[in-house]
Amino acid sequence: MDIKQTADKHIANTYARYPLALVRGEGCRVWDDEGRSYVDFIAGIAVCNLGHAHPALVETLTAQARKLWHVSNLFYTQPQAELAAWLTEHSFADRVFFANSGAEANEAAIKLARRYFKENGAAERYRMVSMKQSFHGRTMATLSATGQEKVRKGYDPILEGFDFVAFNDIEELACAIGPATCAVMLEPIQGEGGVVVPHRDYLAQVRKLCDESGCLLIYDEVQTGMGRTGKLFAYEHSGIAPDILTLAKALGNGLPIGAMLATERVASAFVPGAHATTFGGTPLVTSVALKVLKLIVEEGILDEVQPKGDYFRSGLEKLKSKYPVIEEVRGKGLLVGARLNIPGAPIVNACMERGYLINCVQDNILRFAPPLIISREEIDGVLDCLDEVFTTI
Ligand SMILES: *Cc1c(COP(=O)(O)O)cnc(C)c1O
């Protein structure tokens, strides 16, 4: 079977795939069907934080697979209970709702925010302020919350009640919050929007505006969570906690799992029957996610994320001073961006030919999100590769 031909013929045409069929992964490396290997600076879009086929995760997954996969949320299971306890002990939150993806975690957050005010006698508060260039997912509610025209195009009428302001513009946010606002929703660092980092104090100012108006603050940490920026959750850098936080991507290191975390006060608006999903938090995925979290802590993974990210960015800064097509280097920890004044696609392809997988968002921003276990040698490797590629353009 020709994998690419079969896929292009039979799979819904929603992705422009790179011309690689990948068959195997180990650590920070993946192999294609012709036996070529690549160093993975995408990690399944900030998902495989502990790399591919991590032995301890394979062990946990197979052990659980022999025991119990799925029973539905009509019953208690230990891995789900343990994971919820772990997440609340290590965050601002008191309760967790388990979903299967980032979009679903955000869907739960949007529903909870609306319901919270309905339950508290303020049904008129249903609007949400989110950010231009944000990304919250592809379901109807989450694309309605997403501040990118290309994501919403073709799906009118989208869900009513979303207002958009520029990320990092506190004045605009202050004007947009009104008596009908139930929540402000944002990514502590915009991922798909191009690795956009907030100004110092921005999150504190957002929190203050929310408190003054009585609306909730929702952080979408689907991309920034789970150690990507050097803390377990990106909000810890600022110390400014939200009322609701969503996770997905790296939570299961590749197994599909999402989670919505909330304080007791807010979560109390969810009662039996208010929200549900068949697969949410199966023993299979929660046992792996629990192991992911334990490994991150036990192996001191977080300690190295910021130093490695700084090392990577300083290397990119050197390239920037050499190649004027690189306009800005940014990011936090191992969520790294380089804004170009030329299209990024040819750079991505040239790196792929040289054995490095990187990716590009917003047409001209190279995004790097390697496994957190990436080595300095591998970072040197991608920097050398980029150096070579930029010489040829
Ligand atoms: C990827 C992403 C989502 C959507 O997650 P899916 O699992 O693809 O539904 C939502 N928010 C952010 C910030 C993301 O990066």
Image: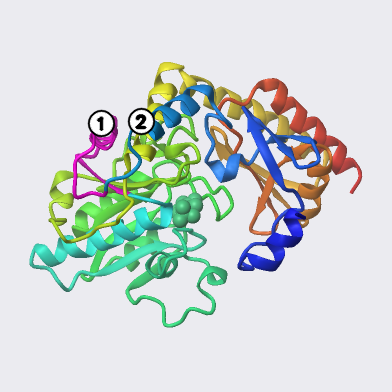
Give yes or no for residue 243 being in the magenta stretch: no
Q: In the image, is 26 to the left or to the right of 236?
A: right
Residue 261 image point, x, y percent: 28, 45
Residue 118 image point, x, y percent: 14, 67
Disc 1 secondary structure class: helix
Residue drawn at x 71%, y 41% as measured from the top left: 357
Which of the 4 image quarters holds residue 251?
A: top left
Query: Circle 1 is placed at which residue position?
Result: 82
Sequence-earlier tag: 2 or 1? 1
Residue drawn at x 27%, y 30% as measured from the top left: 86
| Stretch of the chain drawn in magenta | 72-98
Give yes or no for residue 81 being in the magenta stretch: yes
Q: Amino acid at mark 2?
A: Leu
Front-most of residues 281 and 44: 281
Q: Is residue 380 above or below residue 30?
A: above
The quadrant of the image that shows the N terminus is bottom right
Residue drawn at x 47%, y 27% as measured from the top left: 57
Q: Residue furthest left?
A: 121
Residue 47 image point, x, y percent: 52, 41
Q: In the image, is 17 to the left or to the right of 386?
A: left
Q: Which mark is residue 234?
A: none
Q: Are marks 2 and 1 in contact (CB under 8 Å)?
A: yes
Q: Is residue 162 above or below residue 221?
A: below
Which of the 4 image quarters holds residue 109?
A: bottom left
Label 1: few (<14), some (14–19) or many (≥20) C-alpha neighbours in 10 Å = few
Q: CA distance from mark 2 to mark 1?
A: 7 Å
Q: Amino acid at mark 1?
A: Glu
Instruction: Let me know if residue 310 appears in the view.
Output: yes
Query: Circle 2 is placed at which residue position?
Result: 290
